[in-house]
Image (cartoon, coloured by chain):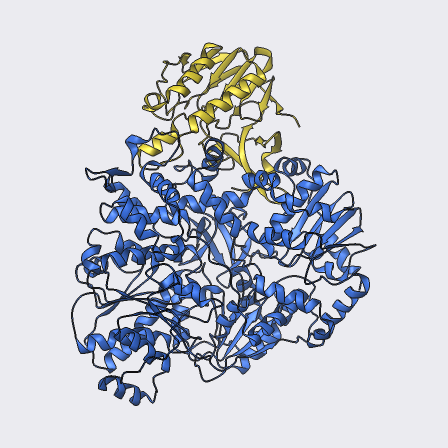
Chain colours: A yellow, B blue
C-alpha cells in the first residue's frame, strides 16, 4: 500500500505522508505540525506520571519520515515544544537526536502558541511564517482564508464508519486551497474535523486524508461520522 | 481449630429482650443465626453461607446488637460493607426497625458517595456505632490521617454478598482495605455473608485475616438449603427464533404471567435488552399495569424511585439488569422471569432467589429463551439447578492496578514502611502469593512512575523520610487519589437531559456521537428525539421523530457463558435421550443436525466447513463463550491470511465461531493447532482494541490517568492525553512496565479470555472432527444469521478504511433475508 496520498493545494502537488508529515517533492520540503515535545513531562510536573518516552517517540518518527522522504528542508509548523520549560526538560539523548536532524537540513521552527519563542539551542532558525512559491506556512489558519495556506494547531482527527466498526484517526484536512496538518507528537490527541472550530474554516466543504497504519485514506467531509 | 469445624457449637440462650422480640414477631431464630452468635461470643470470625432469604443480614448484625445492648459504648462498633449503595441504604432501613422495636440506643448510619460532605466529616469525628458503607467509601475512610482513631475500637466488620465481591477488582480493593483494618484494629472480627457458592473454601481464604484457607481462624457456617425453586421454561406458542436475544416473540406470554402474579421481577442480560423488553411490555400493557425499568445507566434518582415504589409494593413488575441482582429485600416478589440465556447456574440461582424471599417457600421462576441455543442453555441451567452444581472459576490473583491505588491510599493516611506494607498486603487473599518484586514494581510505579528511564525524580508522588518510610509528596496527590478512588471504570458517558427538563441518565459517548439531530432512540423506557449535543449533555425531547428508533448498545455488560453451563449444554447435545425434554422444534433441529452432520461431541471439537454463496465457511463448536471465540477468530483469520485462504470476516457467539473466506479450509486440525497462541497472539494482542480498552481501565485504576466525569471535560481541545497514545508509546519503549503486565493479566481472563481459549486448544488436540459439508448445517444456521448484526471482523484497519473509501458497503441487510428465505430445514 502507498505510504502517502497526493494532495493538491493551490495548484501545488504535495504528498500527505502516513506519518502525518506533508512532503513537497518539487522543493524537497518536509512539513510537520505540533510535535509537542516534552508534553509527557509537563503532565508529570502536574502530578500525572505519564511514560517519559513521548519526545523520543516523536523524534524517532520524525527521523524515520526524514529518511524515507529525504528532504533538504524541514518546516515545523509551531507548538514544537509543549511549553516554555520543555527545552530544559528534554533528555540529553533526545536533544542530541534533534541536533543531528537540524544539522543535516535547512530547519525552520515556526512559532506557535505553546512555543512563541522556540529554543534554537538544538539548531534551526525561527520564523513566524514562511512563504515558498504558492504556499504560505504558519502555525494557525488565518481568518483571511488566503489561498496556499499550510498550517497546524488544530490537531484534526476524523471518524469513518466502516463495515466492521467506526475508526477514528488523525488526519489532514483541506479544501484544495488550504490545508491543515495533523499533530505529529506522540501524545497529541485531536479535535474532530466536524467541530465548528475546524469545519468553520472551510465554509465551502473539505476533504480529509486519514492516517491508517500503512496508508493514507481520503474521504469527503460529508462522508464522515460525527465525533 | 479449622475453618470446617463440623461440631455444632452449643447455642447460648438469646438475651431476654431479644428472645421476646423474636417471640413477638412469631419467629424462631434460625440455627445459623444462633451459630453466628456463638462464633461472636467466642470472638471468632465467621463466614455464613446461606441461600437468599435465610435471614443472613440479621444473622450478621445480631451479635452487634446484642453486644451493644448488653454493654453500651460509643465509637464505631461494627462496620458493614456491601457491594451496592442501594443495599447499604436498604439494610439501614431494615435495621432501624429492630433497633427501635428493641428499644436500643444505637446509632446506625450509611456512608456512600451520596452522603453529604458535612455528614461525612462528622462521621469521622464522631462515628456511629454501626456504619454501613461500600468498598470505595471504606477505601476513602482509610485514606484519612485519622483512620487509626476512627477504627481503633472496631469490634467487627461485616461483608455482605461476599460471593459478588470475592472474584473481582472491587473485591481486591476491599481485601486490601480489610488487611489495613486488621492493622488498625487487630482484635476486629470478620463476618462474611454469602449466597451459596461452588467453592466455600475460596471464600474462607478471602475472608480469613491470614489470606489462606488452611488453618483460617474463622468458622464456616452453612445454613440448610431452602425449598427447591419451581422453575419453568416458557414453551412459547409463538415461533421460536433462530437467533437474536430480545425474545420479543414471547413477551405477550410474559405479560400474561405478570398479570397473573402479584409482583414480577423481569431480569434481562443487557441494558439494551432492558429497554426493548420494557417498551414491548408497555406496548401490550393496555390496562396500564405499573411496570417499571431499572438499569445501571438510569439516573440514581430514577433508580431510587423505582426501588422505593417496589418496596412499597406499588409495582406489578420491574424490568431490570444485574443492577437488581443483589440484595434489596422485596418480600412481595412472587415471580422472577429471566429473559434470555442465564449464562451461569449460580447467577440464575441468585436471580431466582429474588422471588419470595423466604426460606420455607419455593421461589417461582420462568425462563424465557430468546432463540434455539438459549433453549438448550436454559434446559442445561435448569438441570444444573436441580443437581445443585454451581459455576466456579478458580480465584484470580489480585490486580496490580488495584494494589497501586491501595498503596497511594495508604500513603495518603500516613507514612508507611515498604516491608510492613508488603507483609500486610500478602495477608489479603488475592495477594497472598504476590511476589516481592511485583510489589516493588507497583510501589515504584506509585512513587515515580517506575519507568526504566528515570527522569521523574523531581515529580515523585511519594517521597522518603529519614527512616526510609514513604510519604505523599504533595497534598495535590491526596485530592487526586480521592477523586479517582474505586475500581469501576465505565466507558465514557454523556448525560441525557430532557430539554428544559430533568436528567434521565447517561449513555455511552460513542452512541451519542453516532446520532444526528432528529434521530430517535429508546432510553429510560422512553422514545426520545436527539436535539443536539450541548456543552456537557445530550439534549432530547420526548416523542418520536419517525424512522426506526435506535437502542443504545453498551460496551461490556455481556457475561460470557460459564464453563460449567457450557459443559452441561455439550453433554445434552450428545445425549439424544434427553432431547424429549426439549420443545419439539428444538429437538427436531438437533435430529436434523444428526442427519446432516454430527452433533458436537462432549470431548473434542466439531468443525464444519461448507460453501455458501461465493464464500467458504468454517464453523467451530467450541462453547467457550463469546470473548474466547472472538480471540480465536482473530487468531484464526491471521493464520488463514498467511495460508492464502483469503479470510473475509468472522462472527463469534457464546457457542460457536464462524469464519468465512475465499478459499475453503481443508486441514482444520492444523489450523487449530495450539501453537497459534504464540507469536500471533502476542502480535495481535499488541494491537487489539480490547487490550487498549483494558489498558485504559488499568491506567485509571492505577492512577496513571484520571477518570473522566461526565460534564467535567472541557469541550474542544483535549486537556488529557488519551490512554491509546500512552499505550502505544509505553508498549514501544517499555513493554514490560508493570501496567502493561497488569493489562495482559486482565485481558487473559477478561475480554480476550485467553485462559479459556488455551484450555480449549489443549483439550481438543488430536480430537478435532472436521466435517466438510455440501451446505450449511442446521446447527450453523443461528450463527450465520448473526452475520451483519455483529460488529466484528478480522480485517485490518487499513483494509477497512480502504473499503469504506471505495464506498463498499457492508454485506447488505438484504443478504440476511436471503438466508432466512432459504433456510435448509
Residue B79: image location, x then y, percent: 27, 65
Residue at left 37%, top 18%? A118
Give above or below for B532 relative to B323.
Answer: above
Residue B587: image location, x then y, percent: 73, 71
Residue B519: image location, x then y, percent: 55, 52
- Front residue of B234 and B582: B582
- Front residue of B641 and B182: B182
- Front residue of B767 and B405: B767
* Quadrant showing the N terminus of chain B: bottom left
**How many numbered dots are placed on residues in this image?**
0
Q: On the rendered structure, is A124 left or right of B190?
A: right
Residue A90: image location, x then y, percent: 37, 22
Give above or below for A73 relative to B776.
Answer: above
Say if residue B140 shows up in the picture.
yes
* Quadrant showing the C terminus of chain B: bottom right
Say if residue B707 shows up in the picture.
no
- Front residue of B495 and B765: B765
Residue at left 77%, top 48%? B616
Q: Quarter of the image holding residue B456? A: top left
Q: Quarter of the image holding residue B67? A: bottom left
Give above or below for B440 relative to B43.
Answer: above
Q: On the rendered structure, is B549 left or right of A104?
A: right
Q: On the rendered structure, is B367 left or right of B145?
A: right
Amino acid at each position: 500500500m502507498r505510504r502517502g496520498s497526493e494532495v493538491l493545494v493551490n495548484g501545488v502537488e504535495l504528498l500527505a505522508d502516513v506519518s502525518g508529515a506533508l512532503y513537497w517533492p518539487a522543493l524537497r520540503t518536509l512539513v510537520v505540525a505540533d510535535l509537542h515535545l516534552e508534553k509527557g513531562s509537563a503532565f508529570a510536573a502536574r502530578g500525572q506520571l505519564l511514560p517519559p518516552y513521548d519526545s523520543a517517540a516523536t523524534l524517532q518518527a520524525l527521523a524515520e519520515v526524514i529518511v524515507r522522504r529525504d528532504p533538504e528542508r524541514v518546516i515545523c509548523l509551531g507548538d514544537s515544544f509543549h511549553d516554555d520549560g520543555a527545552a530544559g526538560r528534554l533528555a540529553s539523548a533526545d536533544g542530541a537526536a534533534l541536533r543531528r536532524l537540524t544539522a543535516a537540513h535547512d530547519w525552520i521552527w515556526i512559532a506557535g502558541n505553546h512555543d512563541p519563542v522556540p529554543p534554537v539551542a538544538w539548531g534551526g532558525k525561527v520564523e513566524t511564517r514562511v512563504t515558498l512559491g504558492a504556499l504560505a506556512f504558519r502555525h494557525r489558519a488565518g481568518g483571511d482564508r488566503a489561498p496556499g495556506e499550510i498550517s497546524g494547531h488544530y490537531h484534526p482527527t476524523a471518524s469513518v464508519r466502516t463495515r466492521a466498526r467506526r475508526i477514528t484517526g488523525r488526519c489532514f484536512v483541506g479544501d484544495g486551497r488550504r490545508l491543515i496538518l495533523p499533530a505529529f507528537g506522540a501524545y497529541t490527541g485531536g479535535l474532530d474535523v466536524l467541530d465548528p472550530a475546524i469545519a468553520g474554516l472551510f465554509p465551502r466543504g473539505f476533504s480529509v486524508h486519514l492516517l491508517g497504519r500503512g496508508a493514507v485514506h481520503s474521504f469527503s467531509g460529508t462522508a464522515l461520522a460525527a465525533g | 481449630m479449622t475453618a470446617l469445624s463440623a461440631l455444632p457449637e452449643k447455642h447460648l440462650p438469646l438475651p431476654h429482650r431479644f428472645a421476646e422480640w423474636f417471640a413477638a414477631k412469631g419467629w424462631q431464630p434460625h440455627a445459623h443465626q444462633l451459630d453466628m452468635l456463638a462464633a461472636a461470643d467466642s470472638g471468632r470470625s465467621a463466614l455464613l453461607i446461606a441461600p437468599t432469604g435465610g435471614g443472613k443480614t440479621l444473622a450478621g448484625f445480631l451479635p452487634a446488637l446484642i453486644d451493644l445492648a448488653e454493654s453500651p459504648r460509643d465509637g464505631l462498633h461494627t462496620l458493614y460493607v456491601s457491594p451496592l449503595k442501594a443495599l447499604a441504604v436498604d439494610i439501614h432501613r431494615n435495621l432501624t426497625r429492630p433497633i427501635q422495636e428493641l428499644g436500643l440506643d444505637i446509632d446506625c448510619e450509611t456512608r456512600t458517595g451520596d452522603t453529604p460532605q458535612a455528614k461525612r466529616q462528622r462521621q469521622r469525628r464522631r462515628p456511629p456505632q454501626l456504619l454501613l458503607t461500600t468498598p470505595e467509601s471504606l477505601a476513602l475512610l482509610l485514606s484519612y490521617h485519622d483512620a487509626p482513631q476512627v477504627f481503633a475500637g472496631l469490634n467487627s466488620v461485616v461483608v455482605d454478598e461476599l460471593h459478588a465481591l470475592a472474584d473481582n477488582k472491587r473485591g481486591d480493593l476491599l481485601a486490601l482495605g480489610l488487611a489495613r483494618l486488621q492493622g488498625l484494629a487487630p482484635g476486629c472480627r470478620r463476618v462474611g455473608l454469602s449466597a451459596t457458592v461452588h467453592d466455600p473454601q475460596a471464600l474462607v481464604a478471602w475472608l480469613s485475616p491470614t489470606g489462606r484457607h488452611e488453618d483460617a481462624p474463622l468458622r464456616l457456617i452453612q445454613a440448610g438449603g431452602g425449598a427447591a425453586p419451581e422453575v419453568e421454561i416458557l414453551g412459547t406458542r409463538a415461533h421460536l427464533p433462530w437467533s437474536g436475544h430480545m425474545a420479543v416473540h414471547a413477551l405477550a406470554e410474559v405479560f400474561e404471567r405478570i398479570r397473573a402474579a402479584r409482583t414480577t421481577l423481569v431480569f434481562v442480560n443487557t441494558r439494551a435488552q432492558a429497554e426493548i423488553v420494557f417498551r414491548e411490555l408497555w406496548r401490550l400493557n393496555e390496562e396500564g399495569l405499573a411496570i417499571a425499568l431499572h438499569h445501571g445507566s438510569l439516573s440514581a434518582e430514577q433508580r431510587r424511585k423505582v426501588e422505593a415504589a417496589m418496596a412499597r409494593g406499588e409495582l406489578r413488575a420491574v424490568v431490570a439488569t444485574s443492577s437488581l441482582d443483589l440484595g434489596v429485600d422485596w418480600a412481595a416478589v412472587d415471580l422472577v422471569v429471566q429473559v434470555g440465556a442465564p449464562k451461569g447456574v449460580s447467577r440464575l440461582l441468585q436471580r431466582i432467589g429474588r422471588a419470595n424471599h423466604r426460606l420455607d417457600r419455593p421461589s417461582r421462576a420462568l425462563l424465557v429463551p430468546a432463540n434455539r441455543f438459549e433453549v438448550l442453555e436454559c434446559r442445561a441451567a435448569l438441570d444444573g439447578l436441580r443437581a445443585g452444581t454451581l459455576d466456579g472459576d478458580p480465584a484470580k490473583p489480585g490486580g496490580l492496578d488495584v494494589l497501586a491505588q491501595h498503596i497511594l491510599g495508604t500513603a495518603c493516611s500516613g507514612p508507611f514502611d515498604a516491608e510492613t506494607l508488603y507483609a500486610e498486603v500478602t495477608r489479603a487473599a488475592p495477594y497472598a502469593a504476590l511476589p516481592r518484586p511485583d510489589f516493588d514494581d507497583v510501589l515504584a510505579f506509585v512513587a515515580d512512575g517506575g519507568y526504566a528511564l528515570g527522569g521523574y525524580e523531581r515529580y515523585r508522588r511519594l517521597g522518603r523520610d529519614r527512616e526510609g518510610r514513604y510519604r505523599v509528596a504533595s497534598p495535590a496527590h491526596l485530592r487526586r487519589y480521592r477523586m479517582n478512588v474505586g475500581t469501576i471504570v465505565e466507558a465514557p458517558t454523556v448525560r441525557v437531559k430532557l430539554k428544559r427538563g430533568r436528567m434521565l441518565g447517561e449513555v455511552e459517548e460513542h452512541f451519542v456521537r453516532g446520532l444526528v439531530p432528529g434521530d430517535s432512540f429508546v432510553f429510560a423506557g422512553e422514545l426520545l428525539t436527539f436535539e443536539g449535543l450541548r456543552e456537557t449533555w445530550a439534549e432530547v425531547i420526548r416523542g418520536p421523530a419517525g424512522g426506526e428508533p435506535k437502542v443504545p448498545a453498551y460496551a461490556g455488560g455481556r457475561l460470557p457463558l460459564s464453563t460449567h453451563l457450557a459443559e452441561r449444554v455439550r453433554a445434552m447435545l450428545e445425549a439424544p435421550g434427553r432431547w424429549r425434554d426439549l420443545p419439539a422444534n428444538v429437538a427436531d433441529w438437533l435430529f436434523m443436525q444428526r442427519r446432516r452432520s454430527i452433533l458436537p461431541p462432549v470431548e473434542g471439537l466439531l468443525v464444519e466447513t461448507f460453501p455458501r454463496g461465493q464464500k467458504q465457511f468454517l464453523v467451530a463448536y467450541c462453547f467457550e463463550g463469546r470473548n474466547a471465540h472472538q480471540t480465536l477468530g482473530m487468531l484464526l483469520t491471521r493464520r488463514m491470511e498467511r495460508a492464502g485462504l483469503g479470510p473475509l470476516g468472522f462472527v463469534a457467539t457464546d457457542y460457536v465461531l464462524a469464519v468465512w473466506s475465499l478459499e475453503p479450509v481443508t486441514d482444520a486440525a492444523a489450523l487449530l493447532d495450539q501453537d497459534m497462541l504464540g507469536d500471533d497472539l502476542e502480535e495481535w494482542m499488541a494491537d487489539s482494541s480490547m487490550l487498549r480498552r483494558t489498558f485504559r481501565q488499568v491506567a485509571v485504576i492505577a492512577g496513571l490517568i484520571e477518570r473522566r466525569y461526565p460534564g467535567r471535560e472541557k469541550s474542544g481541545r483535549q486537556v488529557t492525553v488519551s490512554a491509546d497514545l500512552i499505550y502505544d508509546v509505553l508498549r514501544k519503549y517499555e513493554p514490560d512496565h508493570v501496567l502493561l503486565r497488569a493489562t495482559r493479566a486482565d485481558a487473559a481472563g477478561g475480554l480476550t479470555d485467553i485462559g479459556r481459549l488455551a484450555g480449549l486448544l489443549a483439550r481438543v488436540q488430536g480430537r478435532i472432527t472436521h466435517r466438510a459439508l455440501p451446505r450449511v448445517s442446521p446447527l450453523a444456521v443461528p450463527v450465520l444469521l448473526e452475520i451483519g448484526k455483529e460488529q466484528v471482523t478480522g480485517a485490518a484497519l487499513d483494509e477497512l478504511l480502504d473499503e469504506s473509501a471505495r464506498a463498499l458497503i457492508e454485506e447488505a441487510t438484504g443478504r440476511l433475508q436471503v438466508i432466512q428465505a432459504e433456510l435448509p430445514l
